Image: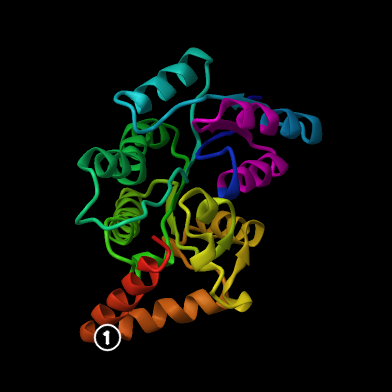
Amino acid sequence: MTRRLVLITGASAGLGEAFARAYAKRGWDVALTARRKDRLEALAADIQDETQSDALVLPQDLSEPGAVDTLLVTLKERGRTVDGLVNNAGYGLTGSFFESDWSEETAFLTVLFHAPIELVHKLLPGMAERNYGRIINVASLLGYTAGSGGLYGPMKAGLIKFSEAVHAEAEERSLNIHCTALCPGLTQTEFHDANGTREQINESPEWMWMDAEPVVEAGIQAVTRGQPVCVPGGVNKGVAVLAKLLPEPLGRAAIKAQMRRLNRYR
């Protein structure tokens, strides 16, 4: 019997790598995609050495036109259907939105928002036909809180609402398809090294940070039980609740304060 397959974007490091290992330990096969082929191959070798799961390596830059179709055609040619999806690929842009290059913002929009939604849209018909699907969209606590300007927070807020909408429609249709927005706060990964904000973010107290593994476990447990939104960790849950209650003037003041902090590191 063929194992269930989960497609994980941004699988070469951080939460994506942790998701791949966690699903493989649960007996799923994993399809790994990211830009760095060498990192994917090393991860796939580890997974196949340590578990009975198969690990497919699918190097792809999701900012490129047709990237989603390329991934899905490749999987179809290998005779595999996708039962689970983890939309994890992402990064952060530094600098001011006022001064950014639009080509950078376009790629950013594609990877963090357009590609995840396209993947869900194109995989849902098959999931509906088989009456099974598990979808995790990695959003962010910044989807609830005042961010640092630019598109990151708004896109993550959009992913939260999108996940809720997909989950609700699947439920309305009585389908065994669960869609969860995972909203981590500060997490120990390479994310802040890659976007050059490590020095700034290290000012945050240690108690605000979580390791990748418990974040991933919370996400998998949430999608398994059909929870449309998951905020992992007690501190993050508290922040999310406070953010909903925060008056708009205070939210705008927080954005200004965060922008001043960022400007110190440019």
Residue located at (42% from left, 67% from top): 141
> How many dots with numbers?
1
Residue bounds of the magenta highlight: 16-43
- Whether residue 84 is situated above or below residue 42 in the rendered picture: below
Mark 1 burial class by Cα count in 10 Å: few <14, some 14-19, many 20+: few
x then y, percent, for residue 112: 35, 46
Q: Is residue 264 above or below residue 137?
A: below
Q: Where is residue 151 shown, x and y percent of the image?
A: 27, 56
Q: Residue at the spot x=31%, y=46% of the render? A: 113
In the image, taking residue 226 as reference, residue 114 lies left or right, namely left
- Residue located beneath label 1 in the image: 250
Q: Residue at x 33, y 68 (%)?
A: 147
Residue 74's x, y, as percent?
A: 46, 17
| Residue 17 counted in the magenta span | yes
Q: Quadrant of the N terminus?
A: top right
Depth order, front residue of 159/221 = 159
Q: Position of residue 258 (x, y in %)?
A: 35, 73
Q: Is residue 148 left or right of residue 1?
A: left
Which of 24 and 158 lies nearest the eye of the viewer? 158
Residue 36, picture quadrant: top right
Q: Is residue 144 left or right of residue 212?
A: left
Q: Quadrant of residue 12?
A: top right
Residue 64: which quarter of the image?
A: top left
Is residue 218 something that shows in the picture?
yes
Front residue of 252 and 56: 252
Q: Main secondary structure of the magenta part?
A: helix
Camera sees residue 3: no
Q: Amino acid at mark 1?
A: Leu
Q: Secondary structure at mark 1?
A: helix
- Asked whether 24 falls inside the magenta stretch, the response is yes
